[in-house]
Amino acid sequence: MTPLSAYLLVGALVFAIGLAAALTRRNAILVLIGIELMLNAANLNLIAFWRFGPNPEALIGMMFAIFSIAVAAAEAAVGLGLVIAIYRHYNTTDLDQLNRMKG
Amino acid sequence: MSPVFYLLAAITIAGGLAAVLLKKLVHCALAAAAAFAGLALLFLSLDAQFAGFVQFLVYLGAVAILIVFAILLTRNAEEQDGGLFSRTWFAGLVVAAAVFAVIGWAVLRSGSVLPNQLAVPTATVRDIGVALMGRYVLPLEIVALLLTAATIGAVIVAMHEKEGEQ
Amino acid sequence: MAQNLDQIFVLLTGWMVSYLPEWLRPYGVAVLGVVGVLAVYVTLFALTTWFERKGLGRMQNRYGPNRCGPFGLFQPVADGIKALTKEDLVPRSADQVVHFLAPLVLLIVICMGLAILPVGRNMVLVDMDAGLLFFFALGASTELSVFMAGWSSRNKFSLLGAMRAIAQMISYEVPLLLSAISAVMIAGTLSLPKIVEAQAGFSGILPHWYVFTPWGFAGAVIFGIAAKAETNRCPFDLPEGESELVAGYFTEYSGFKFAIFFIAEYLGMFSISSVSVTLFFGGWGAPLSFLTFIPSWIWFFAKVLTIIFVFIWVRATLPRLRQDQLMNFAWKFLLPLSLINLGVTALWRFMGDGWQRWIVCAAIVIVSYIVLGLWGMRRQHVAPRKYSYAD
């Protein structure tokens, strides 16, 4: 197993864990944590490909990772703002109870 | 692979699993923070110093704090009846396992075509700065715009609704 | 001779390591360096607690500690023995694991920050290319351990103190980073030893420190204020305001764990003072050109202790702020001022070497300071206070 495939496997595992969190947990905040874990796993892949791939001096993978971290931060802020707004409205963050389209 | 890699991978995966499985929300958030820290250390082990420190700064300094604040602001959401997992947890688990199986199979099968350049690349902060201000200046500006919009949007979404005021 | 005295610790390390076999030498250098830095900073911590109590006593017209040893010099030792022998109480309802981990995480993170400080010529443990970013990344990680301490105690005072501390640290991190960036812009590097090198040299007898430029002066003042808020020192000690919150987020800690919080607070103060010395006060450089014969590490620690003295002086002089004043000061005064200062720095960088840039930059800094200050202190319409719980 080459180093790159080891890092890719870790990335895949973290991605799967994040996906499981997003799909199985009932709390909306946990779903957001799962999405963050998935984004992070993608970043790990980008950095790993930058490190072991050809042409690292072009910094492409690194730049992708840095921009994706910035986007993930924006996503977390908006997502948690939405969770708080929903909580104010329905007084719950349980996704199984948030199944009405009408407020 | 070095023992350092295995240690960091174990921290990351254990943190991620704990974030999914633990009962208390704050514990989940702290476990997720451990996973973020493990990922940042994995970045450092890949010689990506700048990206690793940025990961530390953004995820442990901002995202983890945001998550715990959100948990405390939605306080009595902790007392949920009917378990931690949704009704369709089994389907979700199957989907996640299937995704992992497919990606893992693809990674393991493509071992021979993956690049394997072992020379340590040098990415000084100066190189990154030059790249950000030169080739990537347009994405940088767009990200700045996105962050501003996201901040304002998050504040407006989370603001108190006016109807309740006396 | 002066050369040897300047490099005495480097030479000493080399001499001690030369007895080791070849393959062990890098590890030997690392271990000696870590032990040396930790020993110096912990000794400094013990001395500073004595110095602070003595200084506060002098400023408040009393004696301060005077029972243990000459001038009460052994007071830190007595305190240490007391902290070690006290019972370690953990509340029964506390979250045991998180409660145990919080002080450890805090201490580890703070001690890691000491590794990048250039304490003298050729005397830095790790010369990282992104050293300053490393320091701020660690500073961001301390917030999480503060939250862990406050939340796990199951005590409303702890939780309130932790929330206050986090809100304050996040707010003041912004001006802290922005004012540090102005020094980085001129030096063109994030590595702390290189920032010190960029400030080396003298014109006449005066050094080229950044604090002697208009933007550098403003940056140093903003950095100092934000550093005081980051380390939760008076007048920004709301997170542990003892008249309001008992002791803030470490109310429920006792014995040695309390001592760890205490040590971490002081080590954090030292590391942030060291960074401000490095960024704006020329690091280990001598203040006047004919004083260069004094070893560099003496200058470094003299400057750090001077800044610590200013911290203590301010603590003895100013009353504690109110929470809304704290937030308004950070967001409405320090943040715009540090943004303007960033612009002034860019102007300074591109205006060439003439005398005009002094006048232009100084004018912008002073005018923005006055305008922002007047705007912040303008007469506001104060509505009668409304207590939502009493309605």
Image (tube, rainbow, N blue to C red):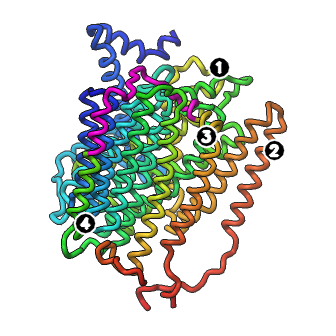
Q: Position of residue C25 (x, y in %)?
A: 31, 13
Can you identify the residue that label 4 sits on? C154
Can you identify the residue that label 3 sits on? B136
Can you identify the residue that label 1 sits on? C290
Query: Which residue does the image show at 28% across and 45% down from the upper left?
Result: B102
Instruction: Name the chain under label 2.
Output: C
Q: Can you say which quadrant of the picture contains the N terminus of chain B?
A: top left
Element under disc 3: loop
* First in sequence: mark 1 vs mark 2: 1
Residue C245 visible somewhere in the drawing? yes
Element under disc 2: helix
Give how far apart the Cα atoms at labels 2 and 4 are.
55 Å
Q: Could you tell me how many numbered marks the image carries?
A: 4
Q: Position of residue C156 (x, y in %)?
A: 31, 70
Q: Is mark 4 in CB contact (under 8 Å) with mark 1?
A: no
Give how far apart the Cα atoms at labels 4 and 1 are.
58 Å
Query: Which residue does the image show at 50% across and 81% down from the upper left?
Result: B161
Q: Is mark 4 in CB contact (under 8 Å) with mark 3?
A: no
Residue type at mark 3: give it: Tyr
| Dots 1 and 2 on the same chain | yes
- Say if the magenta span includes residue A77: no
Can you identify the residue that label 2 sits on? C360
Residue type at mark 2: give it: Val
Q: Residue C287, relative to residue C311: is it above or below?
A: above
| Dots 2 and 3 on the same chain | no
* First in sequence: mark 4 vs mark 1: 4
Residue type at mark 1: give it: Phe
Front residue of C311/C56: it is C311
Query: Which residue does the image show at 42% across and 89% down from the upper left?
Result: C390
